[in-house]
Amino acid sequence: MKSECHPGRRPGGRPSKEEAERLGAKILDGARAVFGTKGIGHASLDEIASELGVSKHTIYRRYPGKAALLDAVVGRDIARFRQALVAAGEAGTEPLDKVRRIARSYVAFGTARDYAAFYLSVNAEAAVSPSLREQLAIWSAAALEPLAEAVSVAQGTGVLRPGDSLLARDVLIDLMEGVNNRVRLAAGAIPDVERLFEDRWQVFLAAMSTPADPGR
């Protein structure tokens, strides 16, 4: 007599690789949502498991604790974020255009509601948690490497003023966060993102581009 099994599931009830991957993604999606709505400090693995309709042991088999789960959630986001920034840069035709496209991609991520809710929660808790603040700095440095590299190349070719590439990157990020905040906190109609971006891009060029740069 043949044993019955679910499609894609191995005999004996063990999940297939595809099922395991789907469950892993479900756990990270659920954890991200709970962290974003409850805050890192107030969210528990019990609550995340309940929200997902899985046992707490299902989560513990993958992650030893909340810190490891948070790191996995952020790690997946960083991979997606970096991939988007790299792709944006590769679409550029010259160094300054690459920086501009990467900055615009940064805004596209930063103005997404679900993304914003989660990271605003992380930033708020990092303000009062030295350990989380230190971890946030590590995550941010990894996520922003493509932008830092593009800025450095633009400086090397002379279209941006020479100097500390990380300082130039941070100035650009501060300006782009202004766009993000205008959109995130808009009480009425969503502002014109392209205009907000272009206004701040011109401010960046005024501060950081070389006088001979035709794109200024």
Image (spheres, helix red, strand yellow):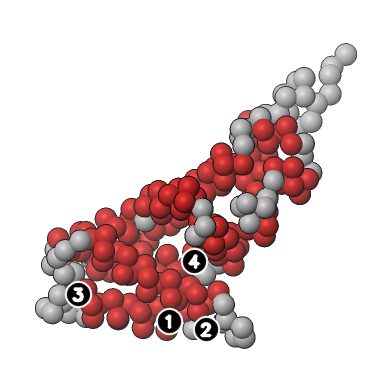
Q: Are there few (<14), some (14-19), or many (20+) residues within 10 Å of tag 2? A: some
Percent position of residue 167, x then y: 26, 64
Q: Considering the numbered disc 3 on the image, is that residue within a helix, a strand or a loop?
A: loop
Q: Nearer the viewer, residue 15 or 120?
A: 120
Q: Earlier in the sequence, mark 2 or mark 1?
A: 2
Q: Is residue 64 visible?
A: yes
Q: Residue at left 30%, top 64%?
A: 169
Numbered disc 2: secondary structure: loop
Name above or below for residue 210 compared with residue 98. below
- Ranked by sequence position, the earlier of labels 3 and 1 is 1
Which residue bears the numbered disc 2? 191
Label 3, label 2: how many angstroms apart (C-alpha)?
27 Å
Sequence-earlier tag: 4 or 1: 4
Report how far apart the C-alphas of labels 2 and 4 lie in the structure. Answer: 14 Å
Q: Looking at the image, which is closer to me, 144 or 104?
A: 144
The part of the image, by quadrant, that contains residue 147 is bottom left
As drawn, which residue projects farthest toward the bottom?
188
Q: Earlier in the sequence, mark 3 or mark 2?
A: 2
Residue designated by label 1: 196
What whole-number distance in Å separates the C-alpha atoms at marks 2 and 1? Answer: 8 Å
What kind of residue is marked 3? Ser
Q: CA distance from mark 3 to mark 1?
A: 19 Å
Q: Quadrant of the N terminus?
A: top right
Q: Which residue in the protein does label 3 denote?
A: 209
Q: Are marks 2 and 1 in contact (CB under 8 Å)?
A: yes
Q: Which numbered disc, 2 or 4, marks the residue that appears first in the sequence?
A: 4
User: What is the total number of numbered labels drawn onto the structure image?
Assistant: 4
Q: Decide which of tag 4 and tag 3 comes sooner along the chain.
A: 4
Dot 1, crowdedness within 10 Å: few (<14), some or many (≥20)?
A: some
Spot occupied by residue 11 in the image (x, y as percentages of width and height): 75, 20
Give the residue number, with chain letter if any, for mark 4: 110
Indicate the quadrant where residue 4 lies. top right
